[in-house]
Amino acid sequence: MEQVTPLLVTNHYRRNRSQYDDIQSTLRETRECFLSAPRHKQIQMLQKSHSFAVISVQTPVHIHEEAFRQLWEGVDSRGRPPEWNLDTALKSVNYKNNKSDYIRHSFDHAHLWDDVSDMLEEGEIDNAHKFILDNMKGVGPAKAPFVLSMLGFEEKMCIDANIVSTMGLDKHVSTVVVEKYDKICQTLRDKMPTLRDETTPFMWQWIVFDWKRGEISHHNVFYQII
């Protein structure tokens, strides 16, 4: 990572502070919505966030979000998409067959998301992170916490390809030990101490992600559907 990068990223944040305040507000509202929702709604929110994370892997953002939108159009009485939606929605997505299987597994194992909901209601966010990593398909060390952070649990962040590139990492983080992963996240954030002190872990990631890509992401499709 070049020494000038922390300054450039922090300046990007400050120039666009009002937009990031709006994003922060959306995240907080989403978390409150989740924690106050009935259990069946919590499970649906987790399944939607899981599918969003699965589709995002090695897929350009515009294709990723359009696929997510198509997937969740016309949900059935159980709150899940019609079966044909999977193949249609994911037709342009990288690794579509594997991702379809991962999303079907999530739909067919709602009881696992029930357990995650229990943990989140009890404030056991690290346990929820570990449980998703151990039990849900298609989300590895980076994307398992992303499932939670998109729902407003900003204590978690995703070390995606943009973070890897920006921070000059040699490779993607592979540890499945939650404590080690969180320590790596903290080490990365410590390299931008000003931004670290002004943001949550997930907002820190969101801002770096945007700076690297040269545009501000609002993920409106996700939050409209969620």
Image (cartoon, grey):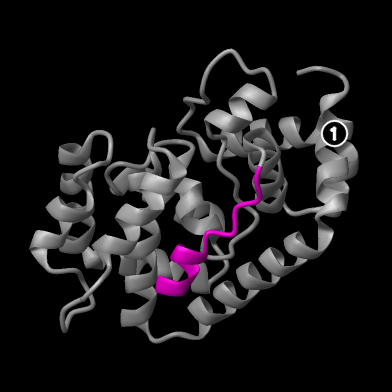
x 50%, y 57%: residue = 148
Quadrant where the image shows the C terminus: bottom left
Identify which amino acid the numbered label 1 is placed on.
Answer: Leu
Residue 186 picture quarter:
top right
Task: Give the magenta range.
Answer: 215-226
Local packing at callout 1 (Cα closer than 10 Å; few below 14, some 14-19, many 20+) is few
Side (left or right) of 158 relative to 197: left
Quadrant where the image shows the N terminus: top right
Q: Front-most of 59 and 145?
A: 59
x 40%, y 54%: residue = 65
Q: Front-most of 106 and 97?
A: 97
Above or below — where is 58 with respect to 63?
Answer: above
Q: How far from the left and from the top, in percent, is residue 133?
A: 39, 44
Residue tagged 1: 8
Query: Magenta segment: does it hold 220?
Result: yes
x 40%, y 60%: residue = 49
Q: How far from the left and from the top, in percent, is residue 134?
A: 34, 43
x 35%, y 80%: residue = 41
Side (left or right) of 91 relative to 190: left
